[in-house]
Image (spheres, helix red, strand yellow):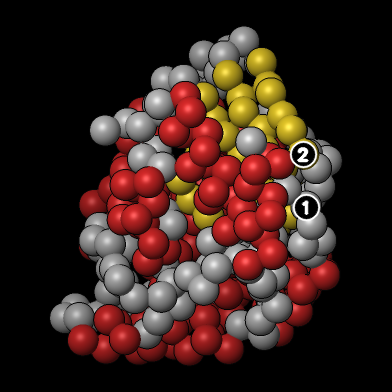
């Protein structure tokens, strides 16, 4: 399946608007599938590391709801999909009140990050990393400080979104501190196996697949999985739901985290992206996988 999907990478382009991402290997393509009993199948360049980028949005959403509560989080950010690009400001200007449509677009994710408990950037990032360590069972995961710095220094649009929302009372606190937290969460470095295990935790309703310990309350895992279906693939989420038909969240580094409820977590990585910011070969690989094994949740 990796061999079949790999040629499609030539049709995409590695993200370069964040300078640190431009160095990714365009030839890399990998997949890992985590099933019960710690069974992990993998193929391709599985040792290749990459940053979470927007995949981090599902982790911070879970943490923000645990910290601030469902009511407060969704008083600041909506639950509706959007046909606009993930970094668009257009809907913020026309919505009353001026809150982002959902937590998977950049504006919504910036609001979510501002609701995570912690007095300092380091404290907030530390709590995000702790949750990532729990979900992956990998305490060695850290941040790519090179990409975090590159992202922070070039985050002019996210800075503009933040100041717009600050003006309208949607974001509280210091804009620059929140932006630093956000860029560091996006710069958490993983591989496909880590993604697959995060997916398996969500697939099991927030429970550790090995011990059964609750990492995330089941109702929060359900909310996260629903957003993955409706908004997880940017403004291509509808097409993905029809063609692949399983919950997924992509990131502009080329990673995709996916899952089949109660059965498996899936991690995919291929850096060349389509115009909407999704990995071209990664999406094709998931489409082949879903079709072959009839994984559709519908």
On the question of residue 128 being in view, the answer is no
Disc 1 marks which residue?
A: 28
Residue at the (41%, 75%) spot, across then down: 85
What separation in Å lies between label 2 and label 1 (alpha carbons)? 8 Å
Q: Is residue 276 left or right of residue 146?
A: left
Disc 2 marks which residue?
A: 44
Q: Residues within 10 Å of mark 1 (few under 14, many from 20)?
A: some
Q: Is residue 222 left or right of residue 212?
A: left
Residue 281's label in the rendered image is: none
Residue at the (75%, 79%) spot, across then down: 19
N-term-proximal mark, 2 vs 1: 1
**What count of labels does the image hold?**
2
Give the image quarter of residue 23. bottom right
Residue at the (57%, 34%) spot, across then down: 266
Task: Tell me whether the residue at label 2 lies in contact with that at label 1, contact meaning CB atoms closer than 8 angstroms.
Answer: yes
Given residues 293 and 58, the one toward you in this image is 293
Looking at the image, residue 258 lies above or below residue 137: below
The quadrant the N terminus occupies is top right
Given residues 130 and 244, the one toward you in this image is 244
Whole-percent x, y for residue 71 in the image: 24, 52
Q: Residues within 10 Å of mark 2 (few under 14, many from 20)?
A: some
Instruction: Give the SS element for disc 1.
Output: loop
Whole-percent x, y for residue 226 in the image: 31, 43
The quadrant the C terminus occupies is top left
Whole-percent x, y for residue 61 in the image: 43, 51
Given residues 225 and 125, the one toward you in this image is 225
Give the image quarter of residue 109. bottom left
Q: Is residue 60 left or right of residue 273?
A: left
Q: Residue furthest left?
A: 96
């Amino acid at each position: 399946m990796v061999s079949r999907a790999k040629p499609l990478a030539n049709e995409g382009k590695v993200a370069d608007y964040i300078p640190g991402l431009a160095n990714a290997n365009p030839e890399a393509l990998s997949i890992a599938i985590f099933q019960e009993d710690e069974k992990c199948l993998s193929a391709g360049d599985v040792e290749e590391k990459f940053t979470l980028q927007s995949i981090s949005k599902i982790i911070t959403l879970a943490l923000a709801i645990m910290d601030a509560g469902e009511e407060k989080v969704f008083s600041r950010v909506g639950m509706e999909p959007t046909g606009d690009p993930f970094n668009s400001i257009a809907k913020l200007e026309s919505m009353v009140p001026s809150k982002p449509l959902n937590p998977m677009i950049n504006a919504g994710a910036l609001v979510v990050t501002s609701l995570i408990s912690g007095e300092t950037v380091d404290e907030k990032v530390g709590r995000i990393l702790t949750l990532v360590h729990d979900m992956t069972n990998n305490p060695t995961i850290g941040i790519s400080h090179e990409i975090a710095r590159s992202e922070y220094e070039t985050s002019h649009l996210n800075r503009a979104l933040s100041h717009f929302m600050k003006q309208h009372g949607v974001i509280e606190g210091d804009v620059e501190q929140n932006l630093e937290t956000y860029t560091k969460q996006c710069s958490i470095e993983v591989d496909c196996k880590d993604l697959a295990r995060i997916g398996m935790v969500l697939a099991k309703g927030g429970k550790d697949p090995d011990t059964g310990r609750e990492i995330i309350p089941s109702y929060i895992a359900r909310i996260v999985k629903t957003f993955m279906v409706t908004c997880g693939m940017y403004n291509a989420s509808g097409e993905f739901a029809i063609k692949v038909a399983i919950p997924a969240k992509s990131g502009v580094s080329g990673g995709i985290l996916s899952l089949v409820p109660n059965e498996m977590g899936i991690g995919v990585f291929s850096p060349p992206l389509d115009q909407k910011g999704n990995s071209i070969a990664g999406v094709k690989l998931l489409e082949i996988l879903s079709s072959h094994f009839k994984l559709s949740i519908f």
